[in-house]
Amino acid sequence: MPVEFLSDDEAAAYGRYAGAPTRAELEKMFFLDDADRKLIGRRRGDQHRLGFALQLTTARFVGRFLPDPLEVPAEVIDYLADQLGVADVSQIKQYTERRQTQFDHQDEIKKAYGLREFSAVEAEFTAWVDARAWNTGDGKKSIFVDGVSWLRTNKVLLPGVTTLTRLIARVRDEATERLHDTLYGILSPRQQAILARLLEVPEGARSSDLERWRKGPSVPSGRNMEKALERAGEILSVGLGAMELPPGVPHRRMVDLARYGMTATATTLRRHGPSRQLATLLATVIYLEGKSVDDCLDLLDLLMTTELIGKAETATDKERARQHPKLARHSATLAVAVETLLEVTEYGEELRLEQVWEAIDAMVPRRELKEAVAAVTGMVPPPDADADGQMRALLAERIATVSGFLKTLTTVIEFGANSEAQQVLAAMKTLPRLLDGRKKKVTEDDIDVALVSGSWKRLVLRAGSHGSTVDKNAYTMCVLTQFHRHLKRRDVYAGASARWRDPRGQLLDGADWAAAKGPALTDLQLPEHPETLLAEHALVLHLALRDVASRLGTDGVDVTVDEEGRLHVARLNAMPEPPSLVDLRKRVAGMLPRVDLPELLLEVMGRVPGFEAAFTSVAGGVSKLSDFHVSVAACLTASALNIGYAPVVKAGTAALERARLSHVAQNYLSAETFSLANAPLIEEQAKISFAQQLGGGLVAAIDGMRFVVPVPSIYTRPNRKFFGGKRGLTWLNMVNDQGAGLGAKVVTGTVRDSLHMIDVLFRRDGGQRPDIIVTDTGSYSDVVFGLVHLLGMQYRPALADLPDQKGWRIQDADYGPLARFARGKIDLAKVKRHWDDILRVVVSIYTGRIRAYDVMRMLQRDGNPTPLGDAIAAYGRIFKTLHILTYAVEEPYRRDIKGIRNLQESRHALAGRIFHGRKGEVYQRYYKGMEDQLGALGLVLNCVTLWNTFYVDKALARLRIAGYPLAEEDVARLSPFGRRHINVIGTYTFALPDLGPAGVRELRDPDEPDWDD
């Protein structure tokens, strides 16, 4: 009988044995210690001693007494009988002849071990469920699983499954209704009416206002920027973002409601009761306020970076290239004339002007000289001009692109600024008045002349017969480019935004800082006063420099130092592959079963507990669709293979009909549920022996995989190296040394990975937090070194440009051949001065209060660190220097870095093989779609990795049994990313073959010829 939200199988497995316990479980839960034996020893007769032990260990293992105490696997009885010295286990049948005996034993066990009945803690448990449901909004099944754990931890015997599920369902529903009623209650009648109208379709329109608001801009253009501002203005005018929410309403619940409101149709929302409907709309509109501002500023950034500045720079470069031959020719003419002039006047003789011209005319005709002067004057900027003059002139010509939206930008979006950017923001607010067209003549009195510098002066200020006039187009671009620069640095910020707000305001402060400081610093092992810590680091750095200096030129250290102090190390050659490794790799690959990707997904879903349960709806519910797992596998296949629904739809099969797949994808599949599903995959893979031979899971690499996005999108950027003439995105992902993908983030374009790397670290889907982080050469900076080590991890980027690396010292000591290398001096006093602020930044990141990306922006100014950033960089230089020294002299250290990076490259190659549809390009316009599709790819990659790891481990076990000589160093060099045996192209079936009673495929014979060969 179905029990609420549990399937029949899940309900049947509750509080019972799900098959025979493993050997490890027997040893952990069924081993009888001295106290157990003493209690059991009071029984008379083997049947009573064995029966008592059986009830005792059953309650310990499954959390309750069974109606029939003998309904246990034979392995349990045998294990207990062996410990008690009971030779004839068949005597156990006599134990149930007198029913009162088993009840008496249960009472004695409860008294001896402090076990309580559920009725004794029902009120306490109900309060726990209510708090969990109120604060998290987790689904009923998730609360059920953790509730069972709560009961077990508190020594409470599990009640009947119906009792528990109905209580959880009731309490969760009550908490949800209370949330809806609380939010509904703060809305005025006017606000209720405004929200309700969002679901109506206005006369003459094709969709409701809510559906229109939820759709952001995609194509970068001035007109679309105006539309984006109109949309933002509409949403902000409702004014719900400024409302003070009732105390105690968790932010997470507002996020969950908004997530539901962003995906549910207007028809679906209209079906809900007033409280749920309006509470959902309230959360959605509050979320849309921030998102609409984000969309506007993202679009502004894209317009400035690519459409305006980018195209102006490209046009300038092309013009310079076109003019170069002409400039070179005329410059040569002028050079001949000047050289002649210098020659004839070299000896100081007094010459008449006519004589000088005669000498020059003999070399260069005066007509050609005049042409050369005119040409060079026209092509070369004045001596006082900067290199950007031509580009800025082109920008001023593009005023039509920005004039429309600049009239409303600062009125729709409320900006703030720090002291450095106040002047620029004030000038931005005056631009609408200059651009309204009524003021024909603009003078210096109408602008902020102090902002006009460099080549902008020549473009903005024009001398006239009646005094200086102002080119308002050039002035507008002058102010806009400075505004954009300050906006990217967050000197200018938007309070209503999520991504463009003031990072300083997000740092922990006041009571929050006081509460978080102690536990976080304890976890990170950071002191409030840095003197002792810095002294220890100084000593370690000093000894490392001395040690490496003494080892240079000795055997085993293949490092040289040139006269400029640069370190040179021999190229790291690939490790030879012994014949044993080549044969093992071939044999294991030949043993792996052939499988279609959809079958692989279904097999993994059936093998990993908690995987399917992760796919809850946007409202937190669990699907009751039959063959739900088949629909999920089909949606994952369509998304991860980038092939769409057409190849996986099967008419006549309910689980594979297009409408159902669309329903499942929209309601149950998202980046959030993929993250939840990844956690059990990572955990399951880490348990496998082969994964443990690959690594301990504490080393991880972070790198980006690039994808072309051929459709217009404001979340993409151009980069000819990676995307050709198109635009694209970066999927920044993290993989541990066992091959599991721990987390990922979609990044627009190809922005420096270092700006997002730490965020990926702190948004892991599961697995242990790595102790060691490896990246490529281009991802690091001194600030990143400092932040990563302050956050309790080691940072080990690859160093492709080792000779260009500069070392740092703290002490004034003689480091011999490393003296010029370690020429930089670390100012520890600077670190000490800023230590309190450093701790606040680090703890704010550690507790999730602020994104590391925003911190990185805050710590830099036009590529240069702020004083706080410089202090963190100074701290980071200690570890950077230690890393360089170790990297140079320790070959195994370099090989370990190369090994984990090769592992990630192999995962990216597998990803490219899987994501093969549509030429491997992403056809999603919006960030959410990109995040969801690449989240599906990451989940499928982890499924494949787990499946491969499982069967490689099976293959290795069979080889061991067969007496094959397995070398551990060979096993550690096998890959969990094999792909020849996995079919991703062709007809897709979603029916598992008969896997036998063990649920495992048969391994192939490696000696049989491979039909692919």
Image: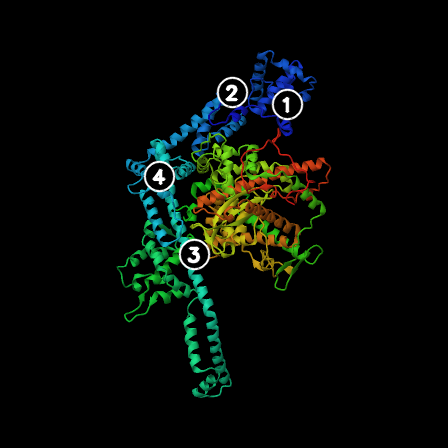
Q: Farthest residue toward the front?
A: 652
Tell me the residue at 66%/15% (across/down). Answer: 91
The residue singled out by tag 1 in the image is 76
User: In terms of sequence position, does the residue under pointer 1 or pointer 4 come before the other?
Assistant: 1
* The C terminus sits in image quarter: top right
In this rendering, position of residue 326 left or right of residue 475: right
Q: Secondary structure at mark 2?
A: loop
What type is the residue that disc 2 sits on?
Glu
Label 2 near label 4: C-beta < 8 Å? no
> Could you give the CA–CA distance between mark 1 and mark 4, rounded to whole angstroms?
59 Å
Determine which residue is flagged by label 2: 117
What amino acid is found at the position of numbered circle 3 in the picture? Answer: Thr
The residue where tag 3 is placed is: 306
Q: Compare residues 307 and 448 and report the one nearer the observer.
A: 307
Earlier along the polypeptide chain: callout 2 or callout 3?
A: 2
Residue, disc 4 = 244
Horizontal relation, residue 746 to residue 963: left or right: left
Q: Quadrant of residue 569?
A: bottom right
Spatial CA distance of label 3 from label 4 is 39 Å
Label 2 – label 1 distance at C-alpha: 25 Å
Disc 3 is placed on an element classified as helix
**The residue tagged with tag 4: helix, strand or loop?**
loop
Foreground: disc 2 or disc 3: 3
Residue 219: give x, y in percent of width and height. 40, 51
Q: Residue at x 51, y 56 (%)?
A: 721
Q: Position of residue 258 (x, y in %)?
A: 40, 38
